[in-house]
Image (cartoon, grey):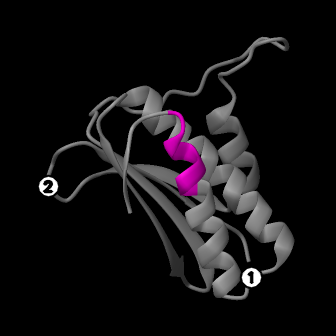
Amino acid sequence: MTILGVDSSVIFARELVRYALIKWGYRRLLIEDSVLVMSEITTNAVNSAPCHQLRVRVAVHDGAPLLECWDPSPELPQARDADLDALNGRGLAIIAAYAKDTGVRPSATGQGKIVWALMPT
């Protein structure tokens, strides 16, 4: 699904995950964890490429949900230490805490990157 890199588009990405995983019969806790992870992945993409087109995808890989978001920025996400009272800066830590595996790969076109998370089953 193609979305615009604006804050409200994160809602569409979350609902895409929720809809797909419910339809595919995953359990409620995994769905909620996956929604949270997609929210963080998409928020990072919105911050990396504001007002540009983004692509989000939900698939199944070896029986587990695979969440992906492409953005046109070549800048790789960077983990950082967030202060206890910081309002942001914990996205990659949240993704790593909930996902079985996660990573970044260049897009097949050579433009931008795909951030992905493979959820546990």
Secondary structure under tag 2 reads loop
Q: Which of marks 1 and 2 is nearer the N terminus?
A: 1
Q: Which residue is drawn at 78% across and 69% down?
A: 30
| The one of 43 and 100 positioned closer to us in this rendering | 43
Q: Residue at x 60, y 66 (%)?
A: 17
- Residue 102's place in the image compared with 90, above or below, is below
Asked whether residue 38 is in view, the answer is yes
Residue under pointer 2: 109
Residue under pointer 1: 26
Mark 2: amino acid: Thr
Q: How many marks?
A: 2
Specify the quadrant of the image occupied by residue 62.
bottom right
The percent position of residue 65, horizontal first and vertical second, equals 60, 73
Q: Which of marks 1 and 2 is in front?
A: 1
Q: Which residue is drawn at 50% across and 27% down?
A: 78
- Residue 102's place in the image compared with 42, above or below, is below
Gap in Å between the C-alphas at discs 1 and 2? 32 Å
Mark 1: amino acid: Tyr
**86 in magenta:** no
Left-right relation of 37 to 104: right
Left-right relation of 78 to 17: left
Asked whether residue 118 is in view, the answer is no
Quarter holding the C terminus is bottom right
Quarter holding the N terminus is bottom left
Q: Which residue is drawn at 63% across and 73% down?
A: 19
What residue span does the magenta drawing correspond to?
7-13
Q: What secondary structure prevails in the magenta region?
A: helix
